[in-house]
Image: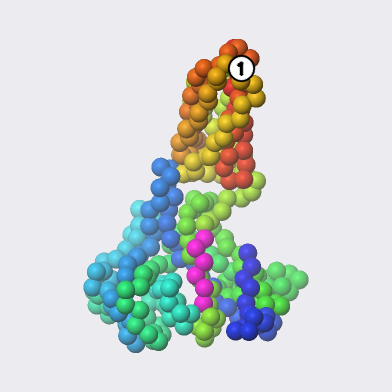
Amino acid sequence: MSLTVADRYGNPVPDGTVLNVGLVDKDDLNSAGTRTSRLLVDSTVGSTAGTTLNDTAVDFTTASSSVNGNDRWIEANDYVLIPTAPAADKVRQVGSIADANNLSVNKAYTADHVGEAYQVGAALTGSLVFGKKQDGVGTLTRGTVETTQGVGWVVVRYPNEVIFDGYYLVARSSDDTAARIFDMVYYAQAPASLVPDITTISNSSTVEFTLEDAGGYALEGVTVSTSVKYVANAGGLVVTASPSPTDSSGRGAVTITVTGGVSGDQATVTLSAVETSATITVTIQ
């Protein structure tokens, strides 16, 4: 992916301008199609003064997240994000836990952000972010990006297990005068494949299917979209389709209900997900 970087007048910054980039794992998409937070803290600022963020609603000494059964507490250099703050205060990193309700950060805040939402988090799942130099070789540098003609190229590497989970990409200038927080998703490798167990039915049926990315990795927690098109309908044929999310094996199902119709009536049910699709044909016998 690319980041476009300009000065206050909209002009590209000089070649070689360095940005710091990092990742914060946001949430986990499970096989029920719901998301569970991976943030260490997701709360509201009590106050920010100097290098201290106060929040009496949170105990920073016990705030944690669990990944693969392993608990992780707040550590030095974890990110402290205030997305609605001006660039100068948008991104900080943990210095230390001063006490249960006060977090020490690496740089003083320029204003009090009382009442604003904030998050504390880190890359907890093994994901990494690199800058890709436009040097003819594509040299990767972890955690920093150098611009060329106002554009910096970013490469994110992550394990298959986090596909479709959410994360924040954090990008900021070395002096914090410019900062952005991008709400992102770990995407599957394209093109994906969606393969129904059967492709023709004549009455109400539950059809199972498999959804995988181009590397053959099962895509979990995805609910396909469905559409119905009538090819021939002389007898009041009505077809509806209700899908369920894919499980950890990439297996999902769609319940197709067929009512009415006479022999020869026909409809197609199209399943779509992750920029791929498959068709099931309903033909009344």
- The rendered magenta stretch, by its main secondary structure, is classed as strand
- At a point 57% along the width and 71% down the height, the residue shown is 142
- At a point 34% along the width and 87% down the height, the residue shown is 50
Q: Is residue 51 visible?
A: no
Q: Give x and y (percent) for residue 192.
A: 62, 43
Q: Give x and y (percent) for residue 169.
A: 51, 67
| Badge 1 amino acid | Ala
| Quarter of the image that includes the C terminus | top right
- At a point 50% along the width and 83% down the height, the residue shown is 176
**Can you say whether 236 is above or below 68 in the image?**
above
Q: State which quadrant residue 173 falls in.
A: bottom right
Q: Secondary structure at mark 1?
A: loop
**Mark 1 highlights which residue?**
234
User: Is residue 150 covered in magenta?
Assistant: no
User: Is residue 181 covered in magenta?
Assistant: yes
Q: Is residue 101 visible?
A: yes
| Quarter of the image that includes the N terminus | bottom right
Left or right, 26 with respect to 18, comes to: left
Q: State which quadrant residue 80 falls in.
A: bottom left
How many numbered marks have been drawn onto this rendered protein structure? 1
Q: Give x and y (percent) for residue 220.
A: 48, 44
**Can you say whether 30 is above or below 81 in the image?**
above
Point out the stretch of residues depicted in magenta: 179-184
